Each structure stands twice: as structure tokens, then as C-alpha cells.
Amino acid sequence: MPPKSAVLHKPYFFYGHRKPTQHRPTVQGGLFSNRQTINPNHPTPKNSPSSSANFELQKWDPDGNLGLKSEKDSSHEFFSLAQRLSPIGRYIVDSFRKHKSWGPPLVADLNRLRRVTPKLVAEVLKHPNIDPRISSKFFHWAGKQKGYRHDFSCYNAFAYGLNRVNHFRAADQVPELMHMQGKPPSEKQFEILIRMHSDANRGLRVYYVYEKMKKFGVKPRVFLYNRIMDALVKTNHLDLAMSVYDDFKKDGLVEDSMTFMILIKGLCRLGRMDEVFELLGRMRENLCKPDVFAYTAMVKILVAERNLDGCSKVWEEMQRDAVEPDVIAYSTFINGLCKINQVEKGYALFNEMKQKNYLIDRAIYGSLIESFVANGKVGLACDLLKDLMDSGYRADLAIYNSLIEGFCNAKLIDRAYKLFQITVQEDLQPDFTTVRPILVSYAESKRMDEICKLLEELRRLSYCIRDDLSKFFTFMVEKDDRIMIALEVFEHLKEKDYCGVPIYNILMEALYKNGEVNKSLTLFSELRDSYYEPDSSTYSNAVQCFVEVGDVQEACNCYNRIKEMSLIPSVAAYRSLVKGLCKIGQIDPAMMLIRDCLGNVASGPIEFKYILTIIHVCKTNDAEKVMKVLDEMLEEGYSPDNVVYCAVISGMCKHGTIEEARNFFANMRKRKHLTEADLVVYDEVLIDHMKKKTADLVLSGLKFFGLESKLKAKGSTLLAG
């Protein structure tokens, strides 16, 4: 007879009361029945199982802290989810977390279990934090256990787990796995895959699963057919959806309202109205006539696709069916008509709603007012505003903004200003969109005092005047004919101290782009002489202006000023300065500037990247390979310019020979990218740059061997620079 201690420590998973049966014991109280919440933040006790070198299953405590970190990490979420599992499920998942990969130690932990059940396997596979590689191994390990066989819940959980980690292609192979293991898949397994792909908008994958269903001889029911067609329609695969519908009819199934509406909405989206009306006729014959919700859905789709003709036909079809449109249908159609500039038809429907005593939404009033203003019919828009207020509504800020813009376009600035005052009185908090049309109208009519008066009123309302003025000047300079007006307004506002560095930058950039370089430089000088401090945008604009007037040295000073501020010039400034340096023959500084740009700017100019590629290819001393890079540039739409030619000169003088450089330029002459005069000019530049490189090498050699002192002693001025 074995000793008493051996009896007490039999290797049962549960140590406590159980029924004497060969199957899994039932816990009646003990270690697992009264689990407490695990707190990962508590330190591991000294006598916990994790501190023991030899793991003993009968002493394993799921409530113990298994070597957790003191700080809150992913383990906190892991244990929170693990609390929902059964005790054995927690043991398995905890083993996965502890070993982190499939191997003999993990298999040894699993072999301690007396038996596993399909319910347990499904429970473990549903856990969201399991590595799919481990869960797959566990799935196959469980299938090899004696007396065990996967059921449908296991396969479903396996498919869900694979899809959860985006291994949906592997999940699609689960039906084949079921078939191989003698468990033919049912419609439910395919439905799971279809639902997963539908939720992820993988339309083609849905069709792939549908084709697999047919291979297995599984015929979908109506609701699953609807789900397949809906997924294909939503992912713009209408033709595939129609082919599925053909199979639907071949199977002898009867359409429901959902079947018809899925296909009708897809056909409406593509404007195939003849097929839409054909399906509507079939719907009337086989089921029932469409209701107001169906017609409203069609109108909404057609309005979104700006298909006015189709929308009108659907509306007429609704009237022929004696279906009374509701407020949503009217609102959808009216808003759509207003968006596509058919406000007269929208207004007719609006009057029709009033005759039927429908409650008209304020959004309908807003759409009609905005459309009337856009068409220059401010009077009708004002009538609608009065009607809106008589109906008990309060106009919102968007409606007032539309009317203010309409009054300003009609040169009725005083009325626009009164509306602005109404928005202030009604505490609607007018924004820049409200006052912008008034400011622009005052500027165009040279009413400078009125601008200052309006700005002062905005200041009293605690608005950030400088931000709004920056937006105003940005809007003004968008049109070339208003740039000089903006400059005139700025000159007047400076006297009232309504100015700032951002406004200077906006005007400098606009004047430069408009060809007024000297005026832009005048603003730059004025800003430097003021108490304002120019920023990187100011100096970047100045770089472009100085290069334009030929003062490359001053442009370099501005660039250096930006670098002293530890800021980065704009890409336009880099481009301009590189061109200016190449123009005066400073090729090496220009190439260094290109490298500096690509090193500092997140997305540098593509032509700069090609230039560095050209210099790199010059190491091969092969003009044909350089021409291939140039051909690629031409294919991308970048024509060769002075900077590209200077890059070839720099690369060939540093890595190649004059002969290959001349071969390149001769090739460009044959392709008519260069004239004969250009060829002569670039040949001189090539020779001069090679002389500089040779002189630099000679000077470097003299300094390296320490001969400069001897030359200076003999009166040489070669190293004076």
C-alpha cells in the first residue's frame, strides 16, 4: 500500500472534492472555485510557484503573480481577459504567455492535462491575445489527442482567430481542413468567412468564398445570398453581384425586399436606370411595390452621384406608384437639386411641401438660400429668410454668412454690415467667414476707414485680429488683380498698427510671384528696419527676390541668416539659390546646397534627387549611362536645365574626364536640347571648373607636404588666398 503522502499528491489537475468518474472532475470548492482578481502591479511573492525551479502542476496557483513587472504593461490586459476563461483555459493561455513559442516545454505543460474537449479548445482559440502561430499549433496538437475530434465550434473559433490577426487567407482554407478531417463544412462556416470579409470590405474575397461554397456543393440561403451581393455592391463589383443574382435565380430562390434593394442601389450608383426600372417591375410582380423608404434610398444615391435625370425618373416612378414622399424624401431631393444648381426645381418642391403642410426642416431653408445667393437672387433668399423666421425658426450662422456674401456681391455692403450686427446681437459668434466678404468689399471700394472701424469692432468682441487679417490678405492675393489693392490696404492699416510678420510674408510672396520683385524687396527692407523680427519665411522670400535681381551674394546672406536661426529655408528658396549659384559659376556650393536641402527637407524636390544620381553615375566615366538618367528625368516630365548641366560638369570633373563630359554635351546637342552657342558656353564652364579642381588638388598637395612655407619664403603669392 502506498504511503499516505503519495495519495494526497496524486497528479490530478484539481485537488479538492470531485465525483469518482474517469471523465473530467467537477470542482465543488477549493483552489479554482473562488478565484480573486489578479493584480499585475503587486510584486511576486517569494514562495510563489514562479520562484520555484521545478514546476508542479498540483501546486499551480492561477491567482499567483507569475513574475510580472511592477509597472503596468501588456500583462495587465492579458490577465484581465484571462479572468473570463475557465480554470483549465486560463492554465493553457498562461502557458502560451509564459513560453511565448511552441516547443517541448509548452507541449510538456499541455501533456499534464488529462484530456481536452472541443469546448475547451474553442474557448482558448477565442482568446484575443494569442499568437496565431501558437494557436495553430495548439489546434493541430489537440486534434491528435486520443479520443478527441474537433467540432464545428473549434473550426469556427480557429477561423475567427486567424482573421483577427489579419491572416484571412489562411482562414479561407479552414473548409478544406474540415473536409480533410472528415467534417464537411456547412453553410455556417462559409457564412462566418463571408461576414468577416464583408466587414473588412474585401469584396473579391467574398466572391472567392462564394465560389468555394459551390465547389463544396453548399447552397446559400436567401439571407446569405443577400450578404454576398451586398458586399460586392459596396466594393464596386456590381457585375459580380449580378452574376451571383443569376445563380440565385437558378437555385429557384425567391427574392425578398432586401435582395431587390441591394441590387437597385448598386445599379443606381452606376446610373444603369433601365435595369433599375426592370428590377422595380419584377419587385412589383413578385413581392410588392417599393415603399417610400426604398424610393428615398434611391434618390439619396442618385443625388450623391449627381444624376439628376435618374433622380427625376425615380421621383416620377414614385408618383406613378402612388407612394407619398415624406419629409426625408423631399429634403434629400431638394438638397441634391440645390447642390447641382437646380434651385428652381428645388423651390417648386419646397412649395409643394408647404401645400401639404409638411414640417420643413431648417436645413432645407439653408440649402435654398445658399443656392439663391449663388445664382445672384438675393431677393428670393431674403424672402426665404423671412419665411424661415415666420415659421418659428432662428436662422443659424451659415444662413447669415450666405446672405452677407450675397449682399456684398450685389454691392449692398451696408445691408451686409447690418446682417453682421444682427449675428452679434443674436450671439451667433460670427467668424472670419462672416466678415471676409465685407472686408473685401470695403477694400475694393477703397473705404479704408470702414475697414478700420470693422476691425475695431471685432477687437471689442475679443477676436484675434492678426489671425483674421492674415486670412484676409491670403484671400486677397489669390487673384492677381487684387494684389495691389491688398498692398494699398496694408499701407493704410500700418498706420493703425494692424500689421505683423505673417502679413509681410504673404504680400512679399504674392508680389514676387506677380513679377513685382522690387516692391517685394522694399517690404523686406521695411520689415528689417522695423521693430518686427523677420522669420524664416521672410528670408526665404527674400532669397528668391535677390536671386531674381541678380544679387546672389545677398541671397546667400539671407540663407545664412536662416541657418543661424536654426531653421530651414523653403524648398522654393533652395531651388532659387541653387539656380543663382550655378548661373554665376559657383557649382560646388550649389551641389552642397542640394545635399543640404535633401538632408533637411522631409520630401525634397525630385529633380535634386536626380542631380545627385547624375553625380553618382559620373563615377563610371560613361556619358551613355548619364544619358539614361537624363532620359528617365524626361519621362518623369523634368526637362534639363542649367543646374543639371552643372551637375554633369561637377561629376565629370571630380570623377570622370573632360572627354566624356564633352560627349554628353554633344549628345544633348544632337537631341536639340542645346544650341550651338550653349555648347560653346558649357565647354568654357567645363574647362574653367576643371582648372579650379586641378588648382585645388595642387594646393592640397603643397599643404600636405608642408611646402607652403618654402614658397612663401621665395616670394610666391600662390597660397595667399
Image: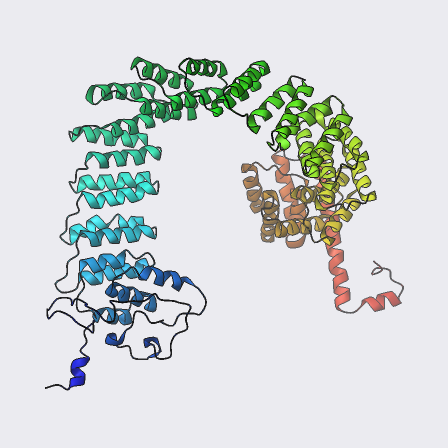
Relative to 30, is 406 on the left or the right? Answer: right
Q: Which residue is drawn at 41% across and 73% down?
A: 43
Q: Which of 593 and 425 is in front in this view?
A: 425
Question: Front-most of 326 and 268?
Answer: 326
How many numbered marks, from 0 up?
0
Q: Position of residue 36 (x, y in %)?
A: 32, 67
Using the rendered image of the protein, determine whether residue 651 is visible from the camera's viewpoint.
Answer: no
Work out whether residue 546 or residue 415 is closer to the camera in this orientation and state it: 415
Answer above or below: position of 158 versus 416.
Answer: below
Measured as percent of width and height from the top left, residue 63 is found at 32, 69
Percent coordinates x, y for residue 498 in the rendering: 76, 36
In the rendered view, tell whether residue 289 sits above or below residue 502: above
For this orientation, the residue located farthest to the right is: 715
Q: Which residue is drawn at 20% across and 48% down?
A: 175
Residue 40 image offset from top left, x and y in percent: 39, 67
How was the colour assigned to the protein in this rendering?
rainbow
Q: Is residue 483 above or below residue 65?
A: above
Q: Say which residue appears at 58% left-offset and 50% top-offset.
A: 617
The image quarter containing residue 663 is top right
Q: 44 and 247: which one is in front?
A: 44
Quadrant position of the C terminus in the picture: bottom right
Residue plotted at (42% across, 18% down): 308
**Quadrant assignment for the N terminus:** bottom left
Q: In the figure, residue 512 lies in which quadrant?
A: top right
Left or right of residue 71, residue 316 in this image: left
Residue 532 seen from this side: yes
Q: Specify whether 314 is left or right of 545.
A: left
